[in-house]
Amino acid sequence: MRRVNWSILAVLVLAAASGGCGISKRVAADRYDAGRFAMAGGNYAQALEELAKAVEADPELSVAHAAIGDIYRKQGNHEAAATSYERACETDPYAFRPHYNLALTYQVLAEAARSSTRAAEFLCKAVHTYLRAVMLQPNDFDTHLNLSACFFQQGKFALAEKYCKAAIRIRPRQAAALCNLGIIYDALNRPHDAIRAYRGSLELDVHQPVLLVNLGGTYFRLKRLGDALNAFNLATRQDPNFASAWERTAACLYHMKRYADSLSAYDRAVRLDARSAASQRGLGVACMTLYVKDSTRREFRDKGLAAWGRSLALDPNQPRLRQLLAKYSPKKPAAPSL
């Protein structure tokens, strides 16, 4: 009987397997290159087709999974993007960019979630993945800043401060990071620190109407009404169509007892955003205050009552406003008795 040399046969089998694997990897690489070329030309359908063939030939090709995720994210299909990025991270646990993009995608999904439970789930995933990305690339500014924002949304303000400060250490002259730090300090009830952060941000970029409204709000809570009004006024000059800035200006003027000016600012706020319950409520308060000061000006009363009615239609959960509406509404004459 002829003896079989099993060792030689085993070598031949291994060589054949190795050769097949090498061919698959070459096919995957070629398909990946074709997919990237199609992506560069904006032909996403063809790119997805080529990349799908790449991962079919080599399921462990992390860059192909990541590229598929990039396309889905560009198309706004964030759930599909997350699935592809998850696969990219599984096949290469040490690649920074897929982890960052996955965390960013989770963050977008959290913002778009229809239920608070689902939003919290995505936010937790985003935090976990950003923490992994921080380990992989400790000096990435965007990762630290986005992680800080996620912790802020979770109400974990101390952790939000920690990672926001880390971002600022990486890029000290980033106005957005200092603005975020001011918001965090406000949440931590540290208004003086918040003001310093806001002012530091303004030194880097003076044109920030949203920041100016935040700064004015901090001054307002400290009862520094003059400083608050200056900040609100600057916000309205920078963006004359910023309805919230006009609403805050009006509220500040009202507390300064400048009722006519307050009414004018509320009118502007309501013209810009008629669906703001706060602006409609404030407009009614300013009108009714002027009516109380001069009860012959019934037009103020009527305008105020109408504004309160609109405010309640927009936000029915205002019991105090309902009481005021009932108090100042004209009493209907009693029906004559027979």
Image (cartoon, grey):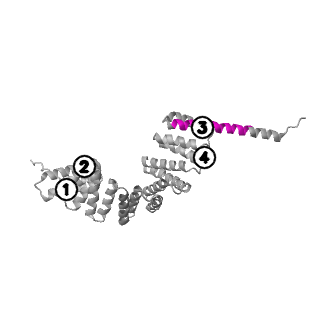
- Residue at numbered disc 1: 261
Q: Nearer the viewer, mark 4 or mark 3?
A: 3
Q: Main secondary structure of the magenta part?
A: helix
Q: Earlier in the sequence, mark 4 or mark 2?
A: 4
Image-quadrant location for residue 231: bottom left
Contact between marks 3 and 2 (CB within 8 A): the answer is no
- Residue at numbered disc 2: 270
SS for dot 3: helix
Magenta residues span 16-39
Q: Nearer the viewer, mark 2 or mark 1?
A: 1
Contact between marks 4 and 1 (CB within 8 A): the answer is no
SS for dot 1: helix
SS for dot 2: helix
Residue at 88% x, 37% y is: 3
Q: Nearer the viewer, mark 3 or mark 2?
A: 3
Q: Position of residue 326 (x, y in %)?
A: 20, 54
Q: Nearer the viewer, mark 4 or mark 2?
A: 4
Question: In the drawing, what numbered circle is on residue 54?
Answer: 3
Under mark 1, the amino acid is Asp
Quick check: is 179 in the magenta stretch?
A: no
Question: In the drawing, what numbered circle is on residue 91?
Answer: 4
Quadrant (top left/top right/bottom left/bottom right) for the N terminus:
top right
Q: Earlier in the sequence, mark 3 or mark 2?
A: 3
